[in-house]
Amino acid sequence: LLLKENELNDTARRRYLELSLSYGERLSRLIMELFELSTLDTPSKKLEMVPFSIAELAQDVAEKWSFETERRNIRFLSDISPDTPFTMGDIALIERVFEKLLENSIRFTPSGGAIRLVVSSNDQLIVARIEDTGPGVGDEDVSRIFDRFYRGDSARFEPDKGAGLGLFIARRIIELHNGHIGVEHGKSGACFFFTLPVLAN
């Protein structure tokens, strides 16, 4: 913009400004995720572990993100069992996991598509699932999708769609809670899920 200040018309100037803004936002997101990751990996990091209702948290998250999905013309559905038992965890960090997975699904679900948030449980585990109608995850990516900085070759991993840290951070948080995180894939869409132990009575 500075070098060609006298040569650019309004259309070209706006295009360069939008490009600069886009790269600035990506850099800001990367810095925030690196800071978040370094905090999680700090040996002195202490989780604020309390008993809480993941069903209530999921409902709050669903209401919060429904505005973004509506803006993008994506149907947002939820199936959250009100009988889901309590778990023990750091509420803010588990909310971050929901956010990371929803951000991922929203990023790759096209206009007119759908995202579904499901929370269920059995005697031992609580299972949270986020299903989308995006391009899905290729066979070659399933085993590495939660690795640090991993960028696959499938349609799920476009060059301008993130830095490859969000899912790694989600995995790290769930590991700190003695849970499990994974992805199921099919011919259409992807389903990311995580589990947490049911709080013992």
Image (spheres, rainbow, N blue to C red):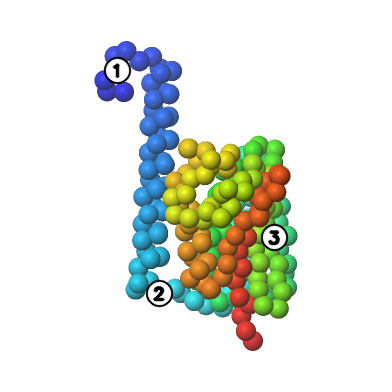
Q: Residue 115 at x, y = what percent?
A: 67, 49
Most extreme residue toward the bottom, as rendered?
Answer: 201
Between 142 and 119, the one nearer to me in the picture: 142
Sequence-earlier tag: 3 or 2 = 2
Q: Amino acid at mark 3?
A: Val
Instruction: Determine the CA span between mark 3 and mark 1.
Output: 52 Å
Q: Is residue 10 left or right of residue 93?
A: left
Q: Amino acid at mark 1?
A: Lys
Residue name at image x 41 percent, y 18 percent: 12
- Choose the circle earlier in sequence order: 1 or 2: 1
- Does the rendering let one see residue 198? yes
* View extreme (left): residue: 3
Residue identifier under label 3 = 118
Compared across the picture, whether 164 is left or right of 28 comes to right
Name the element at disc 1: loop
What number of labels is visible?
A: 3
Q: Which residue is mark 1?
A: 4
Question: Which residue is painted at 44% across and 54% down in the image?
Answer: 148
Whether residue 114 is visible to the viewer of this picture, yes or no, is: no
